[in-house]
Image (cartoon, rainbow, N blue to C red):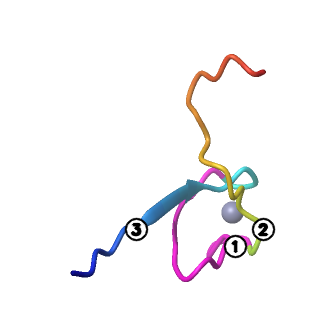
Amino acid sequence: MQSYAFVFRECPGCAELNVVKDGFYYCAHCDGPLPRDPVRPGGSGR
Ligand SMILES: [Zn+2]
């Protein structure tokens, strides 16, 4: 059984939503690095 999980990351640089494929964490729009950790909306920090 194989499952494809698409990982979405919002670019911190241009706020575009990117699909991360094969661990390629770079924005397709501005080539900026994408955060590897999932961004929690309204995070309370730590
Ligand atoms: Zn970007």
Give the residues drawn in magenta, as a range: 15-30
Q: Is residue 26 magenta?
A: yes
- Per the rendering, the mark at residue 32 is 2
Q: Quadrant of ligand 1?
A: bottom right
Quarter residue 30 falls in: bottom right
Closer to us: mark 3 or mark 1? 3
| Residue located at (27% from left, 81% from top) | 2
Left or right: 2, with 20 as reference point:
left
Q: Amino acid at mark 3?
A: Phe
Task: Of the two numbered discs 3 and 2 on the same chain, state the one appearing first in sequence.
Answer: 3
Left or right: 20, with 45 as reference point:
left
| Residue located at (71% from left, 61% from top) | 34
Q: Main secondary structure of the magenta part?
A: loop
Residue 39 in the image: x percent, y percent?
61, 41
Say which residue label 3 marks: 6
- How far is the residue under mark 3 from the one under mark 1? 14 Å
SS label for mark 3: loop
- Per the rendering, the mark at residue 42 is none
- Per the rendering, the mark at residue 26 is 1
- Position of the N terminus, as image quadrant, is bottom left
**For mark 3, does the 10 Å Cα neighbourhood hold few (<14), some (14 to 19), or many (20 or more) residues?**
few
How many numbered dots are placed on residues in this image?
3
SS label for mark 2: loop
Task: Of the two numbered discs 1 and 2 on the same chain, state the one appearing first in sequence.
Answer: 1
Q: Amino acid at mark 1?
A: Tyr
| Residue located at (66% from left, 70% from top) | 27
Q: Nearer the viewer, residue 5 or 32?
A: 5
**Residue farthest front in this picture:** 1
Q: Is residue 33 magenta?
A: no
